[in-house]
Structure formats: structure tokens, C-alpha cells
Image (cartoon, helix red, strand yellow):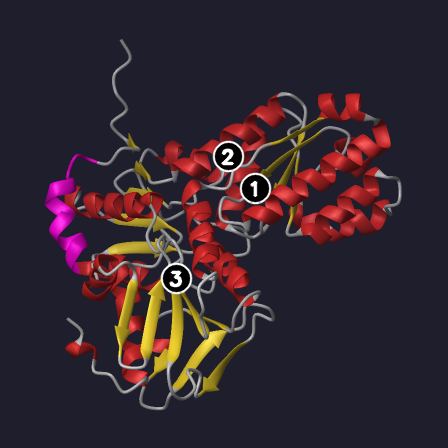
Amino acid sequence: MTPPDVTYFRKGFGLKQEVEATLQADYTGRIVDLMRARDFELVSGDVTIRLAKEFGFCYGVERAVEYAYQTRHKFPGRRVVLVGEIIHNPHVNVRLREMGIEIIMPGEGGFDYSGISAEDVVILPAFGVTITDFNILRERGCVVVDTTCGSVLNVWKRVEAYARDGFTSLIHGKHYHEETRATASQVEKFPGGTYLVVRNMDEARDVCAYIEGRGDRTAFLAKYARSSSAHFDPDLHLKRIGVANQTTMLARESMAIGEEVGRTMAAVKGDAYRASNFRTFDTICSATQDRQDAVNALLEQPLDVMLVIGGYNSSNTLSLAALCAERVRTFHVEDALCIDPARGTIRSRDPVTGLQGDTPDWLGQGPVRVGLTAGASTPNNKIGDAVARVLATCGIDPATIR
């Protein structure tokens, strides 16, 4: 019988009860609990705040953060190192540093593990890490605590299957994002495994144009040099395609990209060819989909302003902000501190241009209806802080809300 691996952990350490009180104290929000109890709506004076019915921490994020807390509790005297941010929320990562967890960030050449020894404990983030990173850490003999989200693992399995069967993985995502890099690396498990990352429908149409014989090889390779396998050849590797995606992308765009590429292959080669040489599956995680669906439902209600809370480097939050901006005046803030009640201003990231700036009198005068949602890495206490600052901007003392 093979002895258990005592240096690799994916299911925590059975210390949930020991860390539960600390987690509750760090991330629970009274105002959010109050809004849940009131059918996700808070009315005070001329202000109505409506909260999307799915928001904030998802299961994968809760699990990753809890396992980090368990790890610190399990190894109080050991050096604990986190590979990159555990999730894209600055407050959570600051809190982990306060607990004595070191966070190493990637440089131009990736992560530097030269300072990691067998005596260290290393936490892998919810996004996962590349196969190369994983193998380096395992070879060093350190304790590895893997918090990779289950939804991400499902995409990895899909990409592995594509590579095994000789398909190029066409990944809808951001080539520089930790999750996408980790996902793309899964093709390395099979000789000749190949991937190409496309950011949006415009880039997917570049792929379609090449399949149709309208692409320029040199220009294509130059444009996608950082978004594809080192050996990627569009003349060879766009003949058999399997579509996957970064789990936090805009769901409707991922589906549309799959349909567009599949339609192009059928138009050029015929339906029989498409059936044998093209695959696509919806691998958007359920939490991402639920939050996007909840925002769409909220946008059916009358709103004057939409507030989206979450890190500016959080892909799922950016997708929520983009959805909202199509329907209503939208402000994407990294946290509640972006709202200044004393000045009546808000500092936000424009969902369309990506530019950051201050907006005065953003709530206007008189009655106002504010919609609110938050990315999957935003804790409830930070959502509650934002609600409190919205109320304060309108001259309402948050302490009076009961």
C-alpha cells in the first residue's frame, strides 16, 4: 500500500472550527446581513440601495482563504509562503501578510523559488499555478497546500483532454492572468500540446479569418507571440480546435466565441469536418455565472446608479462592471475608501476605458436608487463599508440603520 503524501494537501487540515471565529471577525458584514434579511433592499430617507442576490465571496474563494488560515494555524512556527495573491482582493492579501504569511510576486521571468526550502510551507492560490511552478515546488520537498478552485480544475481537465487528442486549446481569457497561464500550461502534459489565448471576440475573429485563408502568417504570429505556445504554428494548429475559457470571463462572450469559431470551421470545411475537429464546452464557473445572472436580474429594476465593488485586477469583477455599464451609469470601485462622503466624490475605474478618476456629486440630488454588486473576491464587511459610505454621502448616519 502506498503511504500517504504528507507534503501535499488539497483538503485543508480539518481545522475549520479552530479558524471559524477569526474568519467571521475578519470578513462578516452587519449591513450585508441586514440587507439579506430585507430581501436585498435597504431604504432610508430618499435613498434606496438594492443588492444583487448573488455577490461577493464564492465557494472557491471562501475555501482558499479558509485553507490559508488553517495553514497558518497548523504551522505556527514554520515559514509560510503564498505564491502570488491568493485572490484578487487587496484587503484579504494584506490580512494574510499581517498573519505572517509571505507573498512572493512574479517578476519578468515568473516566480523566483530560489529562497524556498524543504522546511517551508507553500500555499498555492485559488487561480492555481503552472505545471512548471508546481513541479519545482514538489521537487524542493516543501509542504504544499493547494487551494486551486475546483472550477479551475474542471477547465484543466478539459484542456488536458484537448491536448491528449491532438486539439489546440483556444482559451478565451487574458494571457497574463494567473489562472489562464496555469490553464494553458496543462497542455504540456502531452507532447506537442498547443494553446492559443484570445482576449475577446475581435481576437477570435482573427482566428476565424486565418481559418478562412485571409490571415497573414507573420502578422498573426507577431500579434499572438505572448498568447500562444512557443511552437504554435497557425498553419498547423488551427485545424483541430477545442474551446475553453478563463472561468471568470463574460459568459455570453465565451459562448459566442465558441459558436463563431465552430461556424467558421463548418463554413470552410463542412459540417462533418467540424463535428470531428471542433469541440467547445461552457467552462464558466457556476459562481461567475450566478453573479452575472443576478446582476442582469437587478438591472431589470429601476436604478439611477450601479456600484460594483472589487479589485481592479479581478477578472470576474471587471465582467460584472462591463455588464452594468451597458444598462446604467456604473462606478467600479476597488473598495469603500474610494467613496468620500465628506467631499461627495467617488474615485472609480471606468468600465469601458479602464481609466481611473474622481467624479463629484456622483449620486446627484434628491431621491436616488443605487444598485450594488461585488466580485467573487470581495468580503461582506467591505461591501457593508461601501453601503455605509453611500448612506453617509446622502447625509444618513449608517449607525442609525437597524
SS category of the residue bearing label 2: helix
Q: Are marks 1 and 3 in contact (CB under 8 Å)?
A: no
Q: Which portion, as a residue range, is magenta?
A: 13-25
- Crowding at mark 1 (Cα within 10 Å: few <14, some 14-19, many 20+): many
Q: Nearer the viewer, residue 38 or 373?
A: 38
Q: Which residue is mark 1?
A: 245
Q: Amino acid at mark 3?
A: Thr
Between disc 1 and disc 3, whose residue precedes? 1
Q: Which sits in the foreground, 222 or 346?
A: 346
Magenta segment, prevailing SS (helix, strand or loop) = helix
Residue appearing at x 32%, y 78% in the figure:
47
Say above or below: 400 vs 79: below
Identity, as a three-letter code, of the amino acid under mark 2: Val
Gap in angstroms between the C-alphas marked 1 and 3: 23 Å
Alpha carbon distance from label 2 to label 1: 7 Å
Q: Earlier in the sequence, mark 2 or mark 1?
A: 2
Disc number placed over residue 155 in the picture, else none: 2
**Residue ID at (43%, 41%):** 286
Left or right: 381 as drawn, with respect to 50? left
Q: Is residue 344 above or below residue 208?
A: below
Is residue 37 visible to the viewer in this orientation of the structure? yes
